[in-house]
Image (spheres, rainbow, N blue to C red):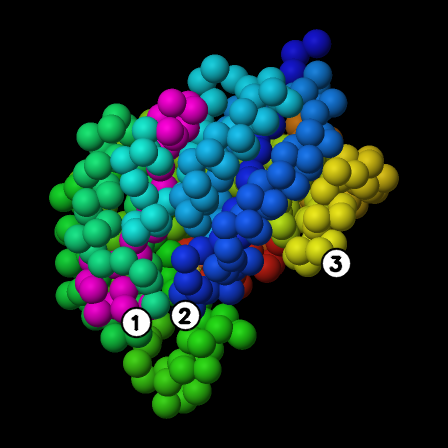
């Protein structure tokens, strides 16, 4: 029997220091806790290893937090555990998120020797004032040094994360960030707008009417977004998802699994999974996680599959984020129902409004639809 495809995500919830805008499950911790966390992760990874008879792993993604904060012996242990517990494709995409200020020659060499073949670097801005405002630990030139080092050591698939909507950011400074990034010729660029999240120092500073004056407005944000698409397209980067751009052949295969509603398994504190029709997340409580990791597979087995209605909604939300869109024949194959029977009225209405295109059986967001994507996608909720 042919094995099914599987993506693995490993969450490393540690960072040198918390950035002022960040509400991810991440923060500083001592080396003893980090070492203990890795041992617990190994237990969780082992608990699912029976899946190796059914699944072939096509992508692995170390995310966080800052995975590159871990000593390289820890990353080695995790990768070795993955290879011993799962059937990993020889051509698997194996990515690691790295933050400037945490990378060294030895770490990069270790990653290469382990088969890690994609680096994702969070720089966010080429403007040091903006980096300070965000509470980042690095400058642009530190990022650039790390980037050049990674290239020199043979990494030929590098993503750079950028952020628009930073307090005080102008169209000029955003253009400068794009120019300086593109000069380095990364293979992939993610460009997200800053979200002001509750519980962060940014929320205190910028959610008040006074604070909001420092943020680029909605109109500027849209201008930056449109400029980004055109500027990057002219330089060979195709937008393949609302916030992601790649040179041909460098689309992130791991993220495509999420957007295509493929099977993925997340390990680590708070990590999410979607496996065999079941959507679930690990606890965000460390003590509980220590206790529960080794019986993770038993808990997964006890879960109910999610209702078909939820799966259909997710299939539309996620698929429409990509420029490949949602193919009606694929919908029909997956659900044994016609997409137009389920969503015909919504599709007609949104197409007439100029938010969607519906060509050759493929549904896609238009640029106008992308500008108000949250509103458009919410129309695919089923009662
Ligand atoms: S480095 Fe990333 S995960 Fe860590 S605190 Fe900053 S934004 Fe959050």
Instruction: State left or right for residue 290 relative to residue 252.
Output: right
Q: Quadrant of the N terminus?
A: top right
First of labels 1, 2 by sequence position: 2
Disc 2, SS: loop
Q: Quadrant of residue 91?
A: top left
Residue 117, percent from left and from top: 37, 27
> Is residue 139 or residue 365 the one in the foreground?
139
The residue that mark 3 highlights is 383
Q: Is residue 199 left or right of residue 213?
A: right
| Residue 50 in sight here | yes
Q: Where is residue 210 drawn, in percent x and y?
A: 37, 90
Task: Give the Cα separation between the discs numbered 1 and 2.
Answer: 8 Å
Residue labelled with disc 1: 133
Q: Which residue is mark 2?
A: 20
State yes or no: discs 2 and 3 in contact (Cβ < 8 Å).
no
**Closer to the camera, 291 or 229?**
291
**What residue appears at the point 14 percent right and 44 percent down from the top-left corner?**
183
């Amino acid at each position: 029997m042919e094995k099914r495809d599987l993506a693995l995500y490993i969450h490393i919830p540690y960072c040198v220091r918390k950035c002022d805008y960040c509400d991810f499950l991440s923060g500083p911790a001592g080396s003893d806790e980090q070492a203990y966390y890795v041992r617990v992760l190994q237990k969780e990874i082992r608990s699912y290893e029976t899946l190796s008879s059914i699944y072939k792993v096509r992508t692995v993604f170390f995310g966080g937090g800052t995975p590159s904060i871990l000593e390289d012996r820890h990353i080695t242990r995790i990768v070795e555990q993955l290879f011993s517990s799962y059937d990993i494709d020889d051509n698997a995409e194996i990515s690691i998120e790295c933050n400037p200020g945490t990378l060294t020659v030895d770490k990069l060499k270790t990653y290469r020797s382990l088969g890690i073949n994609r680096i994702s670097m969070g720089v966010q801005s080429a403007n040091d004032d903006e980096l300070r405002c965000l509470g980042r630990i690095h400058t642009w030139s530190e990022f650039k040094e790390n980037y050049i080092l990674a290239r020199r050591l043979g990494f030929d698939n590098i993503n750079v994360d950028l952020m628009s909507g930073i307090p005080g950011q102008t169209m000029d400074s955003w253009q400068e960030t794009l120019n300086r990034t593109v000069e380095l010729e990364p293979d992939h660029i993610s460009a997200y707008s800053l979200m002001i999240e509750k519980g962060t120092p940014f929320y205190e500073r910028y959610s008040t009417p006074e604070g909001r004056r420092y943020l680029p407005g909605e109109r500027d944000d849209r201008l930056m977004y449109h400029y980004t698409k055109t500027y990057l397209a002219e330089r060979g980067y195709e937008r393949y998802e609302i916030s992601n751009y790649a040179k041909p052949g460098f689309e992130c295969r791991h993220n495509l699994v999420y957007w295509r509603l493929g099977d993925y398994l997340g390990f680590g504190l708070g990590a999410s999974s979607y496996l065999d029709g079941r959507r679930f997340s690990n606890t965000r409580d460390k003590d509980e996680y220590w206790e529960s990791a080794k019986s993770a597979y038993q808990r997964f087995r006890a879960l109910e599959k999610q209702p078909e209605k939820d799966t259909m909604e997710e299939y539309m939300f996620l698929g429409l984020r990509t420029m490949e869109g949602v193919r009606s024949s694929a919908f029909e194959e997956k659900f044994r129902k016609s997409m137009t029977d389920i969503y015909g009225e919504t599709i007609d209405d949104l197409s007439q409004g100029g938010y969607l295109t519906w060509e050759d059986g493929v549904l896609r967001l238009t640029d106008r639809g992308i500008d108000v994507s949250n509103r458009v996608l919410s129309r695919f909720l089923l009662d």
